[in-house]
Image (spheres, grey):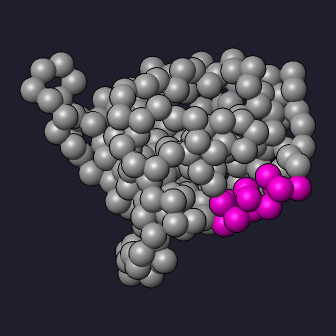
Amino acid sequence: MEVRRFGVFIAVAMMIAMAFVSPAPATAKAPGGHDDSPWHMYGESSYVKIGEKGNQWAIGLESRWGPYDYHGTPYEYSFAGVYFTPPNDKPIYFKDLSVLQFDFFMTEGNAYGGSPRFTLFMWDGVSPSWFVIYIYLGNPPSFIGGLPMNEWTSTGNFIGSMEKRFQIGWFPWTLADYEGALSLAGELGIYYIYLDLDSGWSGNDQAMLVDNICINNFVNKGNPP
């Protein structure tokens, strides 16, 4: 198990980045009334036709600097993502995650400012706020750059990873490998898992395709409904 603190420079960079988090609910209670699909898209996300054979579709995500209106709220940059809600509002406990990964095709920009990432919103059943873990792509420990361009790449399974890519949101600027995260979050229930792209705020525009988003036995291949 490895858990460690960010350096001052990295902490400041991530503080800026985390000011622009996933559009998750404000209270720690799983909402009812969502549709039957566990998969949802937000922001500048769209289905993209990528071929005529095999897996023909992917989900395109973009984050760019420039005025952006999201559901009537103005932003200085655009953002995008895909999020997963467990069926029947029944949480998946962190300790029960066995697969967490996706395939991507980076077409513009690269990893920067904590994006792209997975964001896990968890609840212990009593606290007034969420417990959040961020899982970053890119070169650790800054998570800047390092993603292949213009080729399909798998993140590999983050569950079991020995790299310190898990930021423990309720311990300021703490990075951990999977075992470290498990020791802190194993008994927490996950109500939302976001795949986020949102570093347009920095002027570092980003665009990518994603598919084969795997969360245990749930798989989003990027196909339109």
Q: Position of residue 174 (x, y in %)?
A: 85, 44
52 lies left or right of 114: left
Write down the region rendered in magenta: 8-19
- Rendered view: 72 above or below 10: below
Residue shown at 90%/43% (left/top)? Answer: 5
Residue shown at 70% from the left, 48% from the top = 132
Quarter-wise, where is residue 21 in the image?
bottom right
- In this picture, residue 148 sits left or right of residue 202: left
| Res. 206 in view | yes
Q: Is residue 15 magenta?
A: yes
Identified at 88% across, 49% down, the residue is: 7
Answer with left or right where residue 108 lies relative to residue 132.
left
Say if 9 sits above or below 186 in the image: below
**Residue 125 horizontal side relative to residue 99, left or right:** right
Where in the figure is residue 203, as x and y percent of width and height? 52, 66
Q: Quadrant of the C terminus?
A: top left
Main SS, magenta residues: helix
The image quarter containing residue 50 is top left
How far from the left and from the top, in percent, is residue 117?
A: 57, 43
User: Quadrant where the N terminus lies?
Assistant: top right
